[in-house]
Image (tube, rainbow, N blue to C red):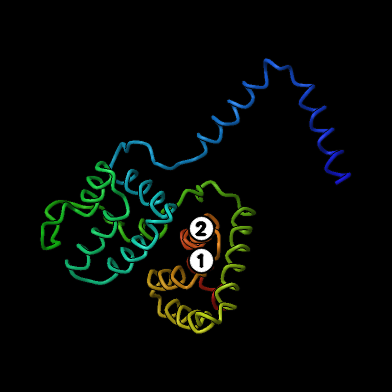
Amino acid sequence: MYRKSILAIFLAAFVGLIPAQNQPAIAAQSGAAQAQSDPCPPPPPSDVSSGFKAAIACEWRTPAAVPHMRHALKDYMDDGATNVKMALNELLLGDERTETKDLYRAAFGVPDTDGQPTAQGLPDVLQTMATANTLNTQSMTDHQKDLLFDKTSGLIRRIFDDHEHNGTQALAGINSLFHRSDYFRALYKLLSALPTGTHPSSYIDDLETLRAAFEIDPHRLAKAVEK
């Protein structure tokens, strides 16, 4: 209690050093910076590829959409027009905005009612669905990447310790998938095995960490699972 009182006095004195007329401006600048740093919802796309990537990254960060994203990833990995159609439907269920639905259909090649493309879609739909994130991994330093993989190792340990949901067995299967070079299926299983915890925002961040690690170096992620 004593320390809290001292801290309150210190903060009050510090704020008193800031001219009153500048305090609202500082607060506004802080709010503007926070708004600028938040990439979701994504801005209007300038092209299908970048728009699709931004929309998918934000859909992964929407708690209600995460189950749809996992199902879409799983469906798209399986061959056949029916599975592609199912994957697209999952994406559409996860984001109700009209402009995003239009973007998703374009990215998938405007499939007909049977799931067959009627136009040229994007060549990297699966890669984008698996790895699109808001962490700007292309600009990360080696040190930042090391920190991200340190966090990844901690998440893998959480899966290992989740005996209630057979986490150790799940990791054994994921390791086998990595060894068979079935990388996207291994990532899907890894995301599915991650405990949700009690804080939805932390769970969303953890999912993004795993997907960013996969984007940076899937082989390094595989080694972390193997350990």
Could you tell me which residue is drawn at 49 percent across and 61 percent down?
207
Could you tell me which residue is drawn at 10 percent across and 59 percent down?
113
Quadrant occupied by the C terminus: bottom right
x then y, percent, for residue 7: 83, 38
x then y, percent, for residue 206: 53, 60
The residue lying toward the viewer, choosing from 27 and 58, is 27
Total numbered labels? 2
Name the residue carrying label 2: 200
The residue lying toward the viewer, choosing from 42 and 141, is 42
**CB contact under 8 Å: marks 2 and 1:** yes
The residue lying toward the viewer, choosing from 190 and 224, is 190
Q: Is residue 142 above or below residue 99?
A: below
x then y, percent, for residue 193: 47, 73
Q: Amino acid at mark 2?
A: Pro
The residue lying toward the viewer, choosing from 176 and 206, is 206
Q: CA distance from mark 2 to mark 1?
A: 7 Å
Q: Which mark is residue 116?
A: none
Q: Is 65 placed left or right of 80 in the picture?
A: right
Q: Is 114 placed left or right of 3 in the picture?
A: left
Residue density around tag 1, few if under 14, some if 14–19, many if 20 or more, within 10 Å: some
Q: Which mark is residue 196?
A: 1
x then y, percent, for residue 184: 38, 69
Residue density around tag 2, few if under 14, some if 14–19, many if 20 or more, within 10 Å: some
Q: Quadrant of residue 192?
A: bottom left
Secondary-structure class at tag 2? helix
Could you tell me which residue is drawn at 57 percent across and 78 percent down?
160
Could you tell me which residue is drawn at 62 percent across and 59 percent down?
146
Q: Amino acid at mark 1?
A: Thr
Secondary-structure class at tag 1? loop
